[in-house]
Image: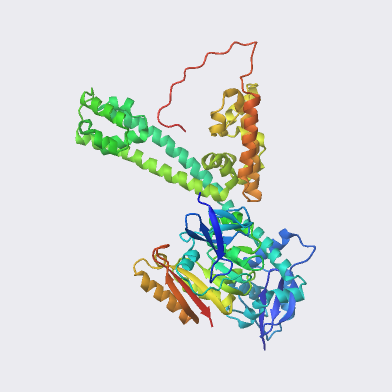
């Protein structure tokens, strides 16, 4: 295995790091909140007494977006995040790393099978993660648990995604808070061109009163995926 | 008339005024309360139910002319069904509630007296437990499905063997030599279904079907000098009906195995991790469900599937069986005979633990269990490396059993 040489903090993203390897390559990483524990088979490297988890942009859309030059970055240490569609916890584990012990991540997932994995690999070891087995389409079902949040991160890949995200944002997002949303065009409408789907989803957000601040494509990390950042005004 | 808002949090239930200020609150969280009770309470709320006491609290804090805004539809209905006079409205766009939600931790600190840091670790624990409970509940209903699936898999296997012997006999009228040359039933079906006439057997076509080089060569050679009778297209069609079905059964078998594996992941991850999904599912089927398996003593698990031998032993004093279906585990059937009983006992003991974790708690501990088991098996292997000496009786001659063909399960 190639040795990691140095590490520096990412210019724009606090608690996101860039690890430099011996062969000159650079990879994103976060400081492991649960030392010694891997979530999805990622590499762990030790530099200067800290353990970093290498963050794979092909597995995590947020890492992909950062590498594609995402400008707005609402995910900061200590904030509160409502994460819709945590699945088995690849991206959420890194978000949890970034938030640190004073932040909190409410992780919603509908499928019991992946939720089990999420609990065992992520939630059980990370005190800043609250697991919620629930359907993101019906936010009132977890309204008694979740507080107001600074960021809603959505990776739910289904038709009317924006509508459900906006429903959640209406209930839980603070004023001035942010929506970060990955749009998988093929899960929304296979018959339409991806760009049309993106436009429609962003329109929906705008109509519900959320201002789209930034949008970018995730190629080559993900085919036919867009990443949208919007704000509650 | 005033609008009031019902605001529910994990530790207390509040009535808010229009500005999102709490007018009254009811503590859910008490020191005397066990974690289980608290989790139950939250679970009930999610299902749209409130306790008597919470209803009383709501009733005493709204006047007849007040309108109560509730976020969750089901809860709203529950309240209006149980409090006849209350005027309840369901809405999710309440600014008052959003405002309270923004001040959640400070409201809780003021009313319940729990500091933010403590609050978060409490919520983390509660939700971890609640989510585990919910995951388990979903899985619980699945164990009987898995039991049926494994029985269906057995049916499919039996049918495959039945059809295979029929096709082998039938097609042997035309090409008897093939029977000896192709051991795997699936390969045999493939050859019959895809090539059919022995005159059409070429090395290339056989290799396309996945037959090994040297075997293919032998088949082609045998085909040229076969003793079989001639075959018409009309006859071959009939044989193919069964052969095609055989192939289809193989694909069903694979899908079933995949289904069982995935379902076992939900139903019984620890059993699956310890002995694999197929054997695990078979044990659940034999016991009649995961709950029943979890309540069996290890000694019973050890001989599940060998009931006939067990009762023969109990009634007539024959030798008791050393293992039932767990014999299928490689640790047992790959070990020398004299070690099998001990390994079976160790495995059954770990299985009993795994089943109980799966049925009652749901965490994943199979890796530790497997390690312990491997350690014990290692111990058995070193302590009993040699067969025990039996001086009084001469060693019986080994029975020359017929070698099975094809199916190894």
Q: Nearer the viewer, residue B311 or B2?
A: B2
Q: Nearer the viewer, residue B349 or B46?
A: B349
Q: Indicate the position of residue B45 as horizontal and vertical percent values.
A: 65, 67
Going by the picture, which residue comes out furthest to the bottom?
A: B1
Q: Indicate the position of residue B281 as horizontal and vertical percent values.
A: 54, 42
Q: Is residue B321 in view?
A: no
Q: Indicate the position of residue A84 as horizontal and vertical percent values.
A: 54, 67
Q: Identify the residue at horizontal 40%, vertical 27% (top origin).
A: B405
**Which corner quadrant of the image does residue B403 belong to?**
top left
The number of numbered badges drawn on the structure is 0
**Which corner quadrant of the image does residue B248 belong to?**
top left
Q: Indicate the position of residue A167 as horizontal and vertical percent values.
A: 53, 75
B153 over B60 or under it: above or below: above
Q: Nearer the viewer, residue B59 or B176?
A: B176
Q: Is residue B392 in view?
A: yes
Q: Identify the residue at horizontal 53%, vertical 13% (top origin).
A: B397
Q: Identify the residue at horizontal 56%, vertical 27% (top origin).
A: B335
Q: Nearer the viewer, residue B152 or A149?
A: A149
**Which corner quadrant of the image does residue A172 belong to?**
bottom right
């Amino acid at each position: 295995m190639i040795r990691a040489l140095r590490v520096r903090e990412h210019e724009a993203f606090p608690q996101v790091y860039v690890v430099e390897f011996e062969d000159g390559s650079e990879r994103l990483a976060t400081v492991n909140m649960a030392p010694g524990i891997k979530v999805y088979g990622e590499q762990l490297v030790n530099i200067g007494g800290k353990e970093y988890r290498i963050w794979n942009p092909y597995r995590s859309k947020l890492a992909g977006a950062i590498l594609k030059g995402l400008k707005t970055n609402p995910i900061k240490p200590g904030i509160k995040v409502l994460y819709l569609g945590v699945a088995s916890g690849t991206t959420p584990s890194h978000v949890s790393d970034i938030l640190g012990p004073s932040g909190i991540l409410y992780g919603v997932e509908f499928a019991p099978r992946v939720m089990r994995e999420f609990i065992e690999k992520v939630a059980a070891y990370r005190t800043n993660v609250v697991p919620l087995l629930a359907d993101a389409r019906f936010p009132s079902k977890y309204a008694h648990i979740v507080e107001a949040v600074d960021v809603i991160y959505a990776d739910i890949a289904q038709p009317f995604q924006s509508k459900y995200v906006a429903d959640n944002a209406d209930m839980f997002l603070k004023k001035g808070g942010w929506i970060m949303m990955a749009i998988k065009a093929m899960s929304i409408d296979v018959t339409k061109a991806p760009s049309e789907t993106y436009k429609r989803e962003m329109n929906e957000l705008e109509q519900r009163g959320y201002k789209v601040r930034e949008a970018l494509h995730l190629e080559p990390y993900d085919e036919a995926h867009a990443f949208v950042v919007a704000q509650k005004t | 008339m005033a609008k009031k808002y019902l605001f529910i949090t994990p530790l207390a239930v509040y009535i808010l005024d229009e500005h999102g200020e709490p007018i009254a609150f009811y503590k859910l969280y008490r020191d005397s309360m066990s974690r289980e009770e608290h989790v139950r309470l939250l679970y009930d709320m999610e299902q749209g139910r409130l306790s008597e006491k919470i209803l009383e609290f709501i009733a005493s804090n709204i006047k007849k002319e007040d309108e109560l805004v509730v976020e969750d539809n089901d809860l709203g209905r529950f309240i209006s069904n149980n409090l006849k006079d209350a005027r309840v409205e369901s809405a999710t766009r309440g600014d008052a509630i959003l405002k309270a939600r923004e001040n959640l931790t400070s409201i809780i600190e003021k009313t319940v007296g729990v500091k933010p840091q403590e609050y978060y670790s409490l919520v983390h624990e509660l939700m971890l437990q609640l989510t585990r409970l919910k995951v388990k509940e979903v899985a619980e209903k699945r164990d009987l499905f898995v039991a049926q699936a494994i029985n269906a898999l057995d049916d499919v296997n039996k049918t495959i063997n039945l059809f295979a012997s029929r096709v082998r006999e039938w097609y042997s009228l035309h090409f008897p030599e093939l029977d000896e040359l192709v051991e795997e039933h699936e390969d045999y079906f493939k050859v019959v279904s895809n090539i059919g006439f022995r005159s059409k057997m070429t090395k290339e076509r056989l290799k396309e079907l996945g037959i090994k080089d040297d075997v293919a060569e032998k088949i082609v050679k045998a085909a040229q000098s076969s003793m079989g009778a001639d075959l018409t297209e009309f006859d071959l069609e009939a044989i193919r009906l069964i052969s095609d079905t055989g192939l289809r059964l193989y694909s069903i078998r694979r899908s079933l195995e995949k289904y069982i594996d995935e379902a076992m992941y939900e139903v019984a991850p620890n059993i699956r991790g310890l002995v694999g999904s197929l054997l695990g599912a078979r044990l659940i089927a034999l016991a009649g469900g995961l709950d029943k398996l979890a309540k069996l003593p290890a000694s019973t698990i050890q001989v599940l599937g060998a009931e006939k031998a067990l009762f023969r032993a109990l009634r007539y004093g024959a030798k008791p069986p050393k293992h039932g279906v767990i014999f299928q585990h490689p640790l047992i059937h790959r070990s020398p005979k004299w070690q099998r009983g001990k390994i079976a006992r160790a495995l059954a003991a770990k299985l009993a633990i795994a089943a109980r974790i799966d049925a009652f708690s749901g965490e994943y501990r199979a890796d530790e269990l497997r390690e312990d088991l491997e350690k014990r098996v290692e111990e058995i292997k070193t302590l009993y490396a040699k067969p025990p000496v039996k001086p009084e009786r001469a060693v019986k001659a080994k029975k020359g059993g017929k070698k099975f063909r094809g199916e190894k399960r």
